[in-house]
Amino acid sequence: MGQNNVTREQVMSIQEFFSMGGYAFYVWTSYGLTLLVLLANIIIPVSQRKHFFRQSLKRKR
């Protein structure tokens, strides 16, 4: 079996990962905005559906 010859320079530290090579603000802001849009695409239709059914029940009464 081959040996895993990983040097210290090849291993990325947690701090280096989160700093993203100096572009952390842009990268993490992009991730955050993407997550926000994805959550909105789930939450907004669900709330609209609930509102629609409540309104339709009120009309039937």
Image (cartoon, rainbow, N blue to C red):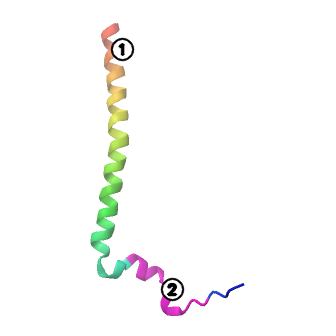
Type of the residue with mark 1: Leu
Residue 58 occupies quadrant: top left
Q: Position of residue 35 (x, y in %)?
A: 36, 55
- Residue drawn at the location 29% of the way across and 58% of the way down: 33
Q: Which residues are magenta?
A: 5-18
**Which quadrant would the N terminus be assigned to in this image?**
bottom right
Residue extending farthest to the front is 1
- Residue drawn at the location 54% of the way across and 92% of the way down: 7
CB under 8 Å between callouts 2 and 1?
no
Q: Position of residue 8 (x, y in %)?
A: 52, 92
Q: Is residue 15 magenta?
A: yes
Residue extending farthest to the right is 1
- Residue drawn at the location 32% of the way across and 53% of the way down: 36
Mark 2 to mark 1 CA distance (whole Å): 60 Å
Q: Position of residue 27 (x, y in %)?
A: 31, 69
Whether residue 27 is situated above or below residue 19 in the rendered picture: above
Q: Is residue 14 magenta?
A: yes
Residue on which the image places disc 2: 11
Residue on which the image places disc 1: 57
Local SS, label 1:
helix
Neighbours of disc 1 within 10 Å: few (<14), some (14-19), many (20+): few
Relative to 59, 3 lies left or right: right
Residue 20 occupies quadrant: bottom left
Whether residue 50 is situated above or below residue 42 in the rendered picture: above
Foreground residue among 44 and 23: 23
**Number of disc labels:** 2
Residue extending farthest to the left is 26
Whether residue 52 is situated above or below residue 43 in the rendered picture: above
Type of the residue with mark 2: Val
Foreground residue among 4 and 44: 4
